[in-house]
Image (tube, helix red, strand yellow):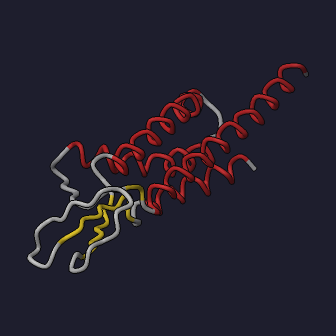
Amino acid sequence: MGQRCKTVGAILVLVSILLPMSTCTTYRDSQGQVAYLKQGEPIPEGVIKKTEYNWALEHFEPTRADAWHKLSLFVWPIFAAIFLVRRPRGKVALGVRVLELPLALYSIWAVEFISTFLTSGRAIGAYTAIGGLSLYVLGAIWADAQLLRIWRNERRT
């Protein structure tokens, strides 16, 4: 069951790349100038509300390291889940299991930063990524607890 949660969570994180991470809402008057409105103020006549969506990999440039870093935030869970299904035991698998929680927490923080820094708010992609990473963490803890229980039983017999 833990591995299923991890797999579903990893797929959700991967799918979230295709969804908008944040929105940016601006108000423009009839001349195209930015109109500044206070919170809760009604939109005056002639002012148009314009909402733009921002994607995580909107300006992906393969020559820039930060683009690959951003991509890795969304891709690592699927690689870790596949690796641990194929090779559930061993030193490398133990290393991957130890790194899962810190990587997931860092990814959650980074998605939160990407989706809220200088934007009007989160969009569906950010919610999907954070939900998927949370499900992945839940599955990782569950799978590790099951493996620990099996390991203890093997040592006792």
Q: In the image, residue 17 lies at what x, y percent? A: 40, 60
Residue at point 76%, 28% (across, down): 148
Q: In the image, residue 48 lies at what x, y percent? A: 24, 76
Query: Left or right: 17 with respect to 90?
Result: left
The foreground one among 36 and 50 is 36
Residue at point 42%, 56% (across, down): 122
Query: Left or right: 89 with respect to 128?
Result: right
Q: In the image, residue 111 lies at what x, y percent? A: 41, 47
Looking at the picture, does residue 64 appear above or below residue 154? below
Looking at the picture, does residue 117 appear above or below residue 98? below
**Residue located farthest toward the top when viewing the structure as drawn:** 156
Query: Left or right: 4 with respect to 72?
Result: right
Residue at point 13%, 79% (across, down): 30
The foreground one among 61 and 135 is 135
Looking at the picture, does residue 37 appear above or below residue 148? below
The foreground one among 86 and 97 is 97
Q: Would you identify the image quadrant in which residue 140 lies?
A: top right
**Residue located farthest toward the right when viewing the structure as drawn:** 157
Q: Would you identify the image quadrant in which residue 25 lies?
A: bottom left
Q: In the image, residue 141 lies at what x, y percent? A: 68, 36
**Residue located farthest toward the left when viewing the structure as drawn:** 31
The foreground one among 120 and 7 is 120
Residue at point 43%, 39% (across, down): 109
Query: Left or right: 45 with respect to 82?
Result: left
